Structures are given as structure tokens and as C-alpha cells.
């Protein structure tokens, strides 16, 4: 029997509260593109991407019209590129990045991820060459995104790689200073990175993934906020959590429906659905707005971490009942520049760097899209990265750092990127030196609970 109320509720989620499919991401293995000749590698990469992704945008747009559900981004994630170029006699990772960018433009996707390396335990030749190439690669391309996994709960933290990435972030920002350091906005450092994450800048096609699959990322913080605001003012925490679970179930069901339909049309396997609540700068589409609906004056108030923990857990519990193929990151994102409420909280001083770090211990993914003064020392950036890697390593969860040292700007200024990247005030960072600590290098050992075989 058709339930009229459920139909109307779903329509309202889409039209009034910004429910959308945040991304459909085609994950594609490039392992068969390896060759000793860089020109052959690039030719194989271009042909394979354009073969598999040629209909992705068209079919996604058709489904968007068929179901009246917005699909905001169409993306591609490929095998970590450090591996693909490693066997070349004349490796040129910037040339590979240009090839990825051209393929992305030609098939019409928004971003392509996988200019990546996994170095939590050490570097291979290809890893080092790719990391050296990142700043230029991000400066000369429009749609390429890069990620480096620096740590894991099994391996510990590669502090040599942390130092290298602090230097790389500064260079990426410097080479794109005419665009407020947007190169650094396309670069993320991970602990425990996920092989099937559909979100940028961290998406790549992991080693255990199939030849090709479609992964879907859903959104809907505006829907959750509206549902909480509609509840009685005296509803207790258990009632709030149950309502969030109910909404997460519906959001997940909607996302999987669209994802499976698209995968079938593309004749590829459906991969996973990522349950993450990904905000946008749009009015009402804010994770910070959910905190206010729960009763906090604003994001950053004492209690924010507890509210985020409950939100994250309830979203996962509701989503896991709706799908047997949940993966990716699956939680609540707190990117400062991409969330209107977070932007306001940071601009007003309600939300500090230290509070954001505390919140990352209970959410997905980490310190995300935070603009900092351009003169911040590399050693301070390395300390920030190390702290976030430690939270992920000890808690056996994915954490990440995507910060932008904006050249020529300081606290009191702001950056404006537009679109989903939004805008952000320059946030102050601790000015105490981390240099002697981070410059020790080496590897911080994995915690004792890594010995769980």
C-alpha cells in the first residue's frame, strides 16, 4: 500500500531541505596501464578512463531527471598513481596528472582522484617521485585531486612523510597563490584512508577493489536539521538519536536506489554507499545547523563534541539498516569552508582550531578545508598533521588534514573559492614551535592494540 506521508516527506527532503546525492564516483583500476614507457602509460590511462566513463555524466543526468533527485557531482577515482608510473624508465608524474585532467575534462566529470600514494610505513621510488610532483601537478591541472596516506593503526605514523607533506602543502599553496592556494584545497593527508571513499580530495581505487565499480556518497544535513526542529522541545537524547536514525535510513535508501540504477545502466558493479553527512555553503544545509537544532547556541559551544558523536553514531546505525554495502568514510563531515554554519562560527571565534581537532575524534574525517595564515611554518603544519594522524591511529578510524596556508593573508582575512568549496576565514594556529619534535623524523610506532591477530 502506498504511504502518502512517506512520499510527501521524501519530496520535502529534496525540495525544501537540500537532500541530494552528493557524488557518484566511478572507481577504476589502472593497474593494467603500467609500462616502461611514460607515453604508453599516458595513452593507456586516457583510453581506459574515456572508455569506462564516457556515459557516466549523461546517464547520471538522465537518472537525476527520472527521479528528480539532484546528483551534484560526477567523479572518477583511480588506482594510486604512484604505482602506475613507478615502472617507467622515464617517469613523469606531472605528465600523468595532465593526462588524468584531460580525460576528466573530456568525459565531463567534476574531479578525478587518485594522484595518490600510501606511505604509512615508508617510501618506494614512485612514492617519492609522485610526492615531489604534487605541487606542480595540482597547479597545472583543474580537476585532479591528490591524497597521501601517512599513517595507520597497524603501521604507526611515518613522520618523514609528515614533514614532506607539510613542505608539499606549502608549495602547492604557493604555486596557486593567485587563486588563494586552491592547490592545497585539492590535497589531503590521511590516516587509515578508505579504499572505496567516493569523496574528494581523498578518493582512490584501492588494491582490493574490483576492476571497476560505482560508489555513491549521500548527503542531507538539512534534512536531519529539519527533522530535529520538528520534534517537541522536550524530546530527550534517545528520542533525538532515534529520529536521526530514521532519517538516515531514508537518505541511504534513496542514495542506494539511484546508485544501483546508475551502475546497472553503466553495466558495472555497484560498490558501496557512503553515509557521510556532507554539508554545503547553501542556507540550511549545515552540520553546524544540526547542533543548533539540538539546543546548542552555535557550533563550538561546550557540548559540540558530544552532539557530533551522537549524530555520527545515529547516522551510521540508521544507514547500516538500509544497505548491506556501506563503506567509504560514513559519518558527519565538518569542513569549515563548505558549511555555512561552520564558516559563521569560525568567523565569530566560536569555533577554534583546538575545538575542531577535538571534534575530529568522533566524526569523519578530520581537519578539513581550514584556511590558515600563509606564513605558518612548515614545522607547525607538520605538527598539525601529526596530531590528527595520532587521533586516527589510536582510535582506529579514518582521519585527515586538508588545510590551506593562504599566501599573503592572515587572521582577519578570508578566502572565497565558490561552489562547494565555499569560503573560509583565516583561522589562527598555535604559535608555539613544533620544530624540534617533528624534525626527529622516523616512525611513531603503532599502538599496542595493533597486535590483534
Image: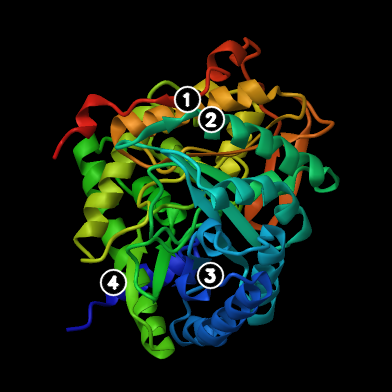
Question: Please, is residue 418 above or below residue 31 in the view?
Answer: above
Question: Please, is residue 264 above or below residue 288 in the view?
Answer: below
Residue under label 3, please give it: 76
Residue 22: image x %, image y %?
Answer: 49, 64
Residue 89: image x %, image y %?
Answer: 63, 63
- First in sequence: mark 3 vs mark 1: 3
- What kind of element bears circle 4? helix
Colour pattern: rainbow
Q: Nearer the viewer, mark 3 or mark 1?
A: 1
Choose between 243 and 70: the one closer to the eye.
70
Q: Residue at x 27, y 43 (%)?
A: 313
Given the current orientation, which residue lies at the most extreme front position? 89
**Disc 2 packing (10 Å; few <14; some 14–19; many ≥20):** many
- First in sequence: mark 4 vs mark 1: 4
- First in sequence: mark 4 vs mark 2: 4
Residues tagged 1 and 2 counted as in contact (Cβ below 8 A)? yes
Marker disc for residue 160: 2
Specify whether residue 338 is in view: no
Q: Nearer the viewer, mark 4 or mark 1?
A: 1
How far apart marks 3 and 1 lie (CA) works out to: 34 Å
Residue under label 4, please give it: 5
Amino acid at each position: 500500500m502506498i504511504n502518502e506521508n512517506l512520499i510527501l516527506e521524501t519530496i520535502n527532503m529534496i525540495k525544501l531541505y537540500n537532500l541530494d546525492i552528493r557524488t557518484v564516483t566511478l572507481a577504476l583500476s589502472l593497474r593494467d596501464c603500467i609500462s616502461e614507457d611514460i607515453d604508453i602509460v599516458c595513452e593507456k590511462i586516457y583510453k581506459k578512463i574515456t572508455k569506462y566513463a564516457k556515459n557516466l555524466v549523461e546517464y547520471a543526468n538522465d537518472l537525476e531527471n527520472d527521479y528528480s533527485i539532484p546528483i551534484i557531482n560526477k567523479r572518477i577515482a583511480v588506482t594510486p598513481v604512484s604505482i602506475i608510473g613507478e615502472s617507467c624508465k622515464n617517469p613523469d608524474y606531472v605528465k600523468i596528472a595532465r593526462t588524468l585532467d584531460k580525460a576528466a575534462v573530456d568525459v565531463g566529470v567534476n574531479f578525478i582522484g587518485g594522484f595518490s600514494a600510501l606511505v604509512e610505513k615508508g617510501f618506494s621510488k614512485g612514492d617519492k617521485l609522485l610526492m615531489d610532483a604534487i605541487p606542480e601537478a595540482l597547479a597545472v591541472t583543474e580537476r585532479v585531486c591528490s591524497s597521501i596516506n601517512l599513517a595507520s593503526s597497524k603501521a604507526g605514523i611515518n613522520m618523514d612523510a609528515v614533514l614532506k607533506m607539510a613542505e608539499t602543502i606549502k608549495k602547492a599553496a604557493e604555486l596557486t597563490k593567485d587563486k588563494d592556494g586552491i592547490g592545497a584545497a585539492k590535497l589531503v593527508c590521511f590516516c587509515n584512508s578508505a579504499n572505496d571513499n567516493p569523496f574528494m580530495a581523498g578518493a582512490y581505487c584501492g588494491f582490493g577493489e574490483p576492476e571497476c565499480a560505482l560508489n555513491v556518497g549521500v548527503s542531507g544535513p538539512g534534512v536531519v536539521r529539519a527533522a530535529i526542529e520538528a520534534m517537541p522541545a522536550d524530546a530527550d537524547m534517545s528520542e533525538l538519536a532515534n529520529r536521526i536514525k530514521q532519517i538516515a535510513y531514508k537518505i541511504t535508501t534513496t542514495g542506494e536506489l539511484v546508485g544501483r540504477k546508475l551502475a546497472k545502466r553503466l553495466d558495472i558493479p555497484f560498490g558501496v554507499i557512503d553515509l557521510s553527512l556532507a554539508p554545503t555553503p547553501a542556507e540550511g544545509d549545515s552540520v553546524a545547523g544540526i547542533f543548533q537544532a539540538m539546543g546548542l547556541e552555535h557550533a563550538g559551544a561546550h557540548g559540540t563534541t558530544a552532539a557530533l558523536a551522537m549524530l555520527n553514531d545515529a547516522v551510521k546505525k540508521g544507514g547500516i539498516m538500509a544497505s548491506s554495502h556501506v563503506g567509504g568514510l560514513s559519518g558527519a563531515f565538518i569542513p569549515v569552508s563548505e558549511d555555512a554554519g561552520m564558516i559563521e562560527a569560525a568567523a565569530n571565534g566560536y569555533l577554534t582550531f583546538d575545538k575542531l581537532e577535538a571534534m575530529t575524534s568522533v566524526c569523519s574525517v578530520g581537519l578539513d578545508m581550514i584556511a590558515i595564515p600563509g606564513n605558518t611554518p612548515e614545522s607547525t603544519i607538520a605538527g598539525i598533521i601529526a596530531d590528527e594522524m595520532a587521533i586516527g591511529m589510536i582510535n582506529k578510524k579514518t582521519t585527515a588534514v586538508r588545510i590551506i596556508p593562504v599566501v599573503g593573508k592572515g587572521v582577519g582575512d578570508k578566502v572565497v573559492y565558490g561552489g562547494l568549496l565555499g569560503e573560509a576565514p583565516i583561522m589562527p594556529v598555535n604559535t608555539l614551535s613544533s620544530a624540534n619534535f617533528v624534525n626527529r623524523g622516523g616512525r611513531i610506532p603503532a599502538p599496542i592494540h595493533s597486535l590483534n591477530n
